[in-house]
Amino acid sequence: MTKQLDITPLTRIGELLETYPELENILIGYVPAFKKLRNPILRRTVAKVATVEKAASIAGIDVRELVVRLRRAAGQSVDDTTESDSASVEDEIHRWSQPPPWIDASKVNVSIDADALLEAGEVPISRIVQAARQLSGDQVILVTSTFRPVPLIEALEKQGFRLFLRQAEPNRFETFVCRLSGQSQAGNDDWPGP
């Protein structure tokens, strides 16, 4: 059987690793947080939604660089990458450059260590979304991680939460989460969970 999967920024990590399991170490080399994908629970959940573009964003690297590296390792042509492949990553970096006025450390009422949850075999998104639903007024959740939690950010933004991501140290990210003004606690029950 011939392997056939065009590796692009939109390729899902789960599909990539099913088709090219030999690319796992290359991916982990670029995105060390993806070591946790060896956990079967995370492999079934996170890998099904995360894309190569998200992996590059989490690692803070150019998506074209990651796509080219993965294509070469899979024996695919690298001539198909375009300038637009990295446009959304650049937009993401610019978006987080200035902290919004609602960031206030005194209003942080919940702190969650995403890495500790992953080490315990839990999917952080479920726990964080549950905590976000419990926020009231101008309370804030602080999520710390050694990676950019792009899938978490997207899930919470879809539910209408305000977020801000900052890189506190070279391998430490802080994601702040709060409700939008007037957002009710019951208004976010459409989250399907893990």
Image (tube, rainbow, N blue to C red):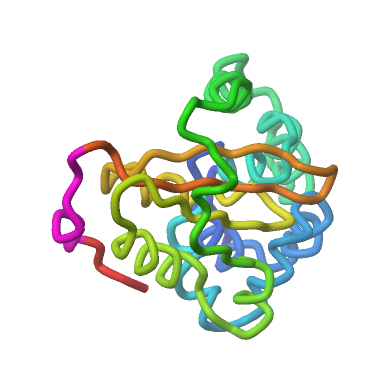
Is residue 157 toward the left or the right of residue 151 in the image?
left
**Does residue 137 appear in the picture of this structure?**
yes
Q: Quadrant of the N terminus?
A: bottom right
Residue at horizontal 29%, vertical 44%?
A: 158
Q: Position of residue 193 (x, y in %)?
A: 31, 71
Residue 78 lies in what quarter of the image? top right
Magenta range is 182-190
Considering only vertical position in the picture, is 94 above or below 191?
Answer: above
**Does residue 8 appear in the picture of this structure?**
no
**Within the magenta stretch, is there residue 189?**
yes
Considering only vertical position in the picture, is 174 above or below 48?
Answer: above
**Within the magenta stretch, is there residue 20?**
no
Residue at horizontal 74%, vertical 56%?
A: 146
Is residue 155 toward the left or the right of residue 147 in the image?
left
Is residue 3 toward the left or the right of residue 187 in the image?
right
Q: Position of residue 48 (x, y in %)?
A: 45, 63
Q: Position of residue 155 (x, y in %)?
A: 37, 51
Q: Position of residue 166 (x, y in %)?
A: 66, 37
Residue at horizontal 49%, vertical 60%?
A: 109
Count up the numbered dots: 0
The outermost residue toward the top is 83
Q: Nearer the viewer, residue 113 or 86?
A: 113
Is residue 190 toward the left or the right of residue 97 in the image?
left
Q: Nearer the viewer, residue 186 or 9?
A: 186
Q: Quadrant of the C terminus?
A: bottom left
Considering only vertical position in the picture, is 192 above or below 147?
Answer: below
Residue at horizontal 75%, vertical 32%?
A: 65
